[in-house]
Amino acid sequence: MPSFKFHFQEIDWVIYIPSHGNASRKYDKYGVDYNDRSGKSTQSGRKESLKDVLSKTQISKKYPHTVGFFLASKGRGPTWKPDYLRSKAIRSKRGFHAFLKELSL
């Protein structure tokens, strides 16, 4: 299933929002996957709410973040490079929600 991908550049995290299944939900209730590329870890095998992921210390205590929106990337590991369609500095969870709204997600 395709997804919308957001790279939190300073901490090297990627949040994946499935393109189906979140319709009519509020942003905090979106089911998402994430990948902590710097710590080489992901969630426990089930989707988490966007609210829970954005509340993780690595994100919530390190604002501002530069977030790149992308659909495709190249390479693996240290050569991984996303093809950003848009990027934006965000300063809070509310700022990330505004970014999602701008992208009409």
Image (spheres, rainbow, N blue to C red):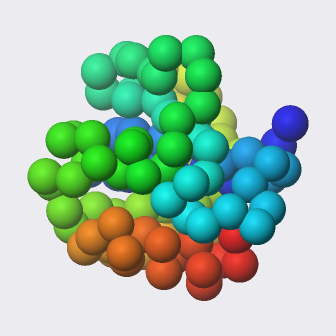
Q: Is residue 1 left or right of residue 99?
A: right
The structure residue drawn at horizontal position 47% and vertical position 30%, both measured from the top left corner, is: 35
Find residue 31 and report its image quarter: top right
Residue 68, percent from left and from top? 49, 61
Residue furthest out toward the left = 61
Vertical placement of 86 versus 83: above or below?
below
Q: On the rendered structure, is 64 left or right of 82?
A: left
Depth check, front residue: 47 or 95: 47
Residue drawn at the location 40% of the way across and 43% of the way down: 53
What residue do we see at 25% from left, 73% from top?
Answer: 91
In the rendered image, the quadrant that contains the N terminus is: top right
Residue drawn where x is 39% and y is 28% of the image? 37
- Percent across and percent down for residue 74 are 65, 36
Residue 69 left/right relative to 8: right
Front residue of this view, candidates 39 and 33: 33
26 versus 11 height, above or below = below
The C terminus lies in which quarter of the figure? bottom right
Residue 78 pos. (x, y %): 42, 25
Q: Nearer the viewer, residue 83 or 27?
A: 27
